[in-house]
């Protein structure tokens, strides 16, 4: 960052120096071609890059020295291989007063730059073309330059107006494919002087992948005399149309940038605005070998649903408009982030998390919330969560510990299901990927356990199912219109690519116990389960009175269907058949043996009679 600023300031300084040189030369002798040749040689010696100036150098004289030219192209430095130029400028014009130069002051009338393009590239080693140009003359000179101090006081600098039009900054990835393009449509600065406040306005666009957004910025600029400190007060910046989910992001407040010997420091106090939602922001950052970020974020209320894609049960749009988060991943690779998040109410779909707090840190491209604490679902939760921005889609890892929550509120909030209620605990150690709840469920992997008490299953009345089974009646809608109350429910949880299993499911109620295993497929939104039903109380008495042979027997219970329409059945008839199957088999064998004996007797009689007749 520091080198980029130095390079840009150096570029501006070079233009000013050229104007000074031209002013002196113009008084004595002026030859456009000769001057261009000298400039080209000087640039080649300093940067190893080739400079081309297609148009003639046009000069004006006293009292203003005016220069105008165009068709300027600067190639990549010699050690950086690419067929793309580093810089192109269609037109450039500047004017400067000659008389103040005698006292060391610089009074610039106006600077106009139009049709400029700057291409930022990186090689396989991660080095940028700007770094290659800055270090073109060798590390020893660079070190010497870093260690050199200038005790002389610079002369005064003033600028009547600066106008930039149609400036484009293109950023390419390691394969020299365009990743994003920053375009400055217009920038206006008037009446600029160091250590004086100057209003600044600019606007343009940002293109990344297939998405294009518009941006604008305004504020009051203050610059130190040595150009090593910048302040922007009353900052008002906004970026619109980033993606389908993130329509706008804004930044307001006071920003300060200072460039020291080995680092560049940035601080900001103000607010960030996400889709119209204000978040207080306090940021301190240092940019050197690593980017050290210390940030504090706080908000009274923050709704996150609008940042997610289509949720479960909703059709995803034809064009997802997903954000390209690779710049975030690239930034985090060489960043050390720490910070704090505090939100009064965090809204995610239909869930409200209150008194939210989280510590922020990163490891490479993964951002951690460790721990994340909140009040939710009439209880509280604590978790370690992480998001890997290099994964496509985003990879989420979460280890939530929910205490004394109402599970029905959780299911209703995230899955729009009202089939289960109960007070209890849910502990998970899960990983997933996705930009919405449904996609996250489909990629869910990990383990956990669930414990509930004083709850109910809505839509299934197991007591009615048992009564229907006892009378061997066919099931009807009434069997699925009630609910089943329970005292306790528990099970471990296993998830593998959206197949969620409860291998040791156990439910206890005053009327029965249900033991077995269940599963749900998040990809198909289906349910499956096979259980053993142990009746208690009046249900047990009614069954044993009608079927004495089923005394103390466990009834087979099956669950199937979908999330929206679960179905269950009890196969009492099959159990009765199994109960009497041994007796049926014994009787069948007895009859078969008897028939066989009778057949042998008859065959023996026939054989004996035949022997008697032969005699």
Image (tube, rainbow, N blue to C red):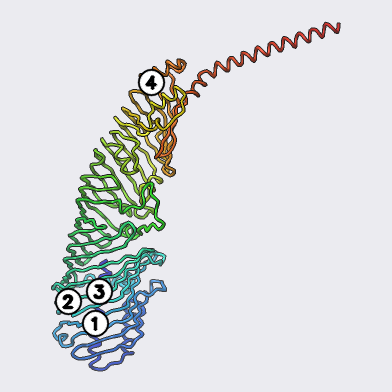
Mark 1 or mark 4, earlier in chain = 1
Give x and y (percent) for residue 244.
34, 58
Give x and y (percent) for residue 249.
26, 60
Do the residues bearing badges 3 and 4 touch, measured as CB atoms within 8 Å?
no
Q: Quadrant of residue 157?
A: bottom left
Residue 404 vertical placement versus 89 (above, below): above
Q: How crowded is the residue under tag 1: few (<14 C-alpha within 10 Å), some, or many (20+)? A: few
Mark 1 or mark 3, earlier in chain = 1
Mark 1 or mark 2, earlier in chain = 1
What SS does tag 1 mark?
helix
Q: Which residue is mark 2?
A: 192
Do the residues bearing badges 1 and 3 touch, measured as CB atoms within 8 Å?
no
Do the residues bearing badges 2 and 4 touch, measured as CB atoms within 8 Å?
no
Q: CA distance from mark 2 to mark 4?
A: 90 Å
Residue 296 can be seen in this image: yes
**In terms of depth relative to the viewer, which is nearer, 42 or 179?**
179
Numbered badge on residue 539? 4
- The nearer-to-camera label among 1 and 3 is 3
Give x and y (percent) for residue 183.
31, 70
Question: Is residue 340 toward the left or the right of residue 413 in the image?
Answer: left
Number of labelled discs?
Answer: 4
- The nearer-to-camera label among 2 and 4 is 4
């Amino acid at each position: 960052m520091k080198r980029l600023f130095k390079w840009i300031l150096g570029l501006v300084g070079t233009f000013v120096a050229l104007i000074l040189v031209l002013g002196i030369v113009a008084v004595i002798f002026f030859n456009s071609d000769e001057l261009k040749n000298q400039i080209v040689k000087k640039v080649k010696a300093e940067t190893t890059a080739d400079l081309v100036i297609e148009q003639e150098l046009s000069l004006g004289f006293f009292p203003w020295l005016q220069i105008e030219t165009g068709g300027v192209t600067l190639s990549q430095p010699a050690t950086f291989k690419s067929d793309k130029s580093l810089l192109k400028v269609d037109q450039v014009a500047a004017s400067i007063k000659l008389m103040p130069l005698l006292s060391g002051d610089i009074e610039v009338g106006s600077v106009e730059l139009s049709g400029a393009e700057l291409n930022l590239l990186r090689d396989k080693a991660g080095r940028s073309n700007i770094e290659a140009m800055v270090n073109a003359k060798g590390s020893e000179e660079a070190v010497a330059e870093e260690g050199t101090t200038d005790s002389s006081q610079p002369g005064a600098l003033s600028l009547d107006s600066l106008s930039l039009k149609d400036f484009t900054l293109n950023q390419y990835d390691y394969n020299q494919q365009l990743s994003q393009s920053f375009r400055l449509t217009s920038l206006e600065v008037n009446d600029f002087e160091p250590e004086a406040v100057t209003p600044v306005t600019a606007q343009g666009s940002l293109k990344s992948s297939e998405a294009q957004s518009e941006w604008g910025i305004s504020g009051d600029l203050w610059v130190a005399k040595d150009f090593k400190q910048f302040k922007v007060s009353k900052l008002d910046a906004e970026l619109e149309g980033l993606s389908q989910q993130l329509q706008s992001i804004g930044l307001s407040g006071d920003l300060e940038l200072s460039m020291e010997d080995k680092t560049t420091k940035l601080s900001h106090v103000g607010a960030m605005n996400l889709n119209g939602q204000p978040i207080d922001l306090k940021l301190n950052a240092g940019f050197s070998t690593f980017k050290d970020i210390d940030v504090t974020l706080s908000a009274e209320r923050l709704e996150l649903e609008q940042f997610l894609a289509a949720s479960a049960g909703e059709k995803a749009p034809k064009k997802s408009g997903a954000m390209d988060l690779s710049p975030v991943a690239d930034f985090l690779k060489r960043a050390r982030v720490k910070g704090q998040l505090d939100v009064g109410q965090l809204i995610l779909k239909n869930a409200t998390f209150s008194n939210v707090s989280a510590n922020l840190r990163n490891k490479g491209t993964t951002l951690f919330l460790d721990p994340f604490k909140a009040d939710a679902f009439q209880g509280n939760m604590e978790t370690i969560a992480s998001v890997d921005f290099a994964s496509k889609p985003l990879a989420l890892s979460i280890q939530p510990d929910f205490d004394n929550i109402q599970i029905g509120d959780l299911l209703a909030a995230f899955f729009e299901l009202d089939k289960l209620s109960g007070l209890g605990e849910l502990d998970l150690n899960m990983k997933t990927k996705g930009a919405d709840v449904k996609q996250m469920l489909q990629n869910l992997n990990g383990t956990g356990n669930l414990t509930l008490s004083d709850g109910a299953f809505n839509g299934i009345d197991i007591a009615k199912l048992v009564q229907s089974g006892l009378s061997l009646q066919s099931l009807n809608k009434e069997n699925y219109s009630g609910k089943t109350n329970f005292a306790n429910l528990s099970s471990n949880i296993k998830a593998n690519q959206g197949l969620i299993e409860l291998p040791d499911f156990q439910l206890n109620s005053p009327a029965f116990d249900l033991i077995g295993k269940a599963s749900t497929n998040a990809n198909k939104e289906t349910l499956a389960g096979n259980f053993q039903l142990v009746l208690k109380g009046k249900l047990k008495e009614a069954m044993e009175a009608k079927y004495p042979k089923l005394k103390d027997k466990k009834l087979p219970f099956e669950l199937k269907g979908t999330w929206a329409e679960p179905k269950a059945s009890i196969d009492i008839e099959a159990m009765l058949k199994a109960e009497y199957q041994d007796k049926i088999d014994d009787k069948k064998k007895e009859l078969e043996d008897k028939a066989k004996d009778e057949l042998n007797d008859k065959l023996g009689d026939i054989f004996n009679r035949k022997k008697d007749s032969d005699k």
